[in-house]
Amino acid sequence: MAGAVIGATIADLHSQRRETIEGGRTIYTEPDRIIVRDPGGQAYVRGNDLYRFRYGARDIRTDTVGGETRTVVIRPDGSEIITVVGTDGRLMRRIRRDPRGREVIIIDNSYRDPRAVGGFYVDVPPPVVSIPYDRYIVDAQDASPQVIYETMRAPPVQRIDRRYSLDEIRYSPNVRMQMPSIDVNTINFETGSWTIPPDQAARLQVIADGINQAIQANPQEVFLIEGHTDAVGNEVDNLSLSDRRAQAAAELLTQQFNVPAENLTSQGYGEQYLKEQTQGPSLFNRRVTVRRITPLLNGDQASAAPPPPRQ
């Protein structure tokens, strides 16, 4: 999934997309991500977020050992962000190492709970939500900075009974829905575009402040940036487009507002979760959502700051 994307709209990608059939799955390959459609008709997108880490890096090293690819991004202060990717291109681990060599594991996607069955979709019932709806799904446009911050630190709406891998969280809606979310409806994407207009970029300031405050309290916090589209266009285009919108928001949070890139991960969902039930163009549906997922990754054991890293 290496390469450069030319253009800034989904139409520009059509000439760069390749379609193959492998084991009954249809795989659409773009320069920097793939879209997979399973035989059952379910489709998902997987991108490569290492591009986000190049910003401000002093040096980048990549080695392959035992089939795993290990990329080390060295920052000007001497700290390192280590990303380990499996043979299939899937993120396995992300680690932050400070200049003294102390390590903190940010994401361990290699973990599989003994109760996990099959692939990465987890079949659990929808969560029982007992908090007010406007505190469960927060509209950034209407919420105060205090509500934004509180949502960035809010606990799950119900007890988490086990740890989940990052892939299980990404691809299982009822798992994600155990955490409150913030709809960033202050950013309006043009149809078919993932570009965030300069005059709207500043609207992410309050989101960035809330994330940074949460990370300051707990350096292991992880936030999922979700991308969405309206129902215009085909499924493959919308999955790619939504994933690029999520990545664009994550990049902007880091480059303009100094949110640590390693504490963010992104995923596109296409038109699967329409906020406005319409098949036509909709600014409400062309959006990004921010969700704290630390308790899901850690089995709800991440409310307090982590213990000091090993020496």
Image (cartoon, helix red, strand yellow):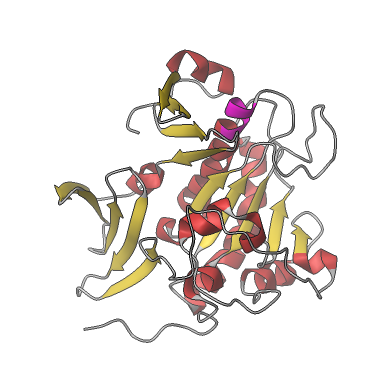
- Which secondary structure dominates the residues rendered in magenta? helix
What number of labels is visible?
A: 0
Q: Is residue 195 visible?
A: no
Question: What is the magenta range?
Answer: 235-239
Q: Residue 204 at what x, y percent from top left? A: 63, 52
Using the image, determine if residue 166 lies above or below residue 151.
above
Identify which residue is drawn at 70% across, 64% down: 125
Identify which residue is drawn at 34% across, 56% down: 92
| Along the line of sight, the residue nearer the viewer: 78 or 268 | 268
Residue 117 as seen in the image, left or right of residue 110: right
On whether residue 223 falls in the magenta region, the answer is no
Using the image, determine if residue 127 lies above or below residue 48.
below
Q: Residue 116 at what x, y percent from top left? A: 48, 64
Q: Residue 96 at what x, y percent from top left? A: 31, 66
Q: Residue 301 at what x, y percent from top left? A: 51, 82
Residue 194 as seen in the image, left or right of residue 164: right
Question: Which quadrant of the structure image shows residue 224?
Answer: bottom right
Residue 209 as seen in the image, left or right of residue 137: left
Identify which residue is drawn at 79% across, 28% down: 281
Question: Which quadrant of the structure image shows residue 198?
Answer: top right
Q: Quarter holding the C terminus? A: bottom left
On whether residue 236 falls in the magenta region, the answer is yes
Residue 235 as seen in the image, left or right of residue 78: right
| Along the line of sight, the residue nearer the viewer: 201 or 80 | 80
Q: Is residue 230 visible?
A: yes
Identify which residue is drawn at 41% across, 45% down: 49
> Can you name the residue that lies furthest to the top here?
15
Q: Quarter holding the N terminus? A: top left
Using the image, determine if residue 269 lies above or below residue 141.
above
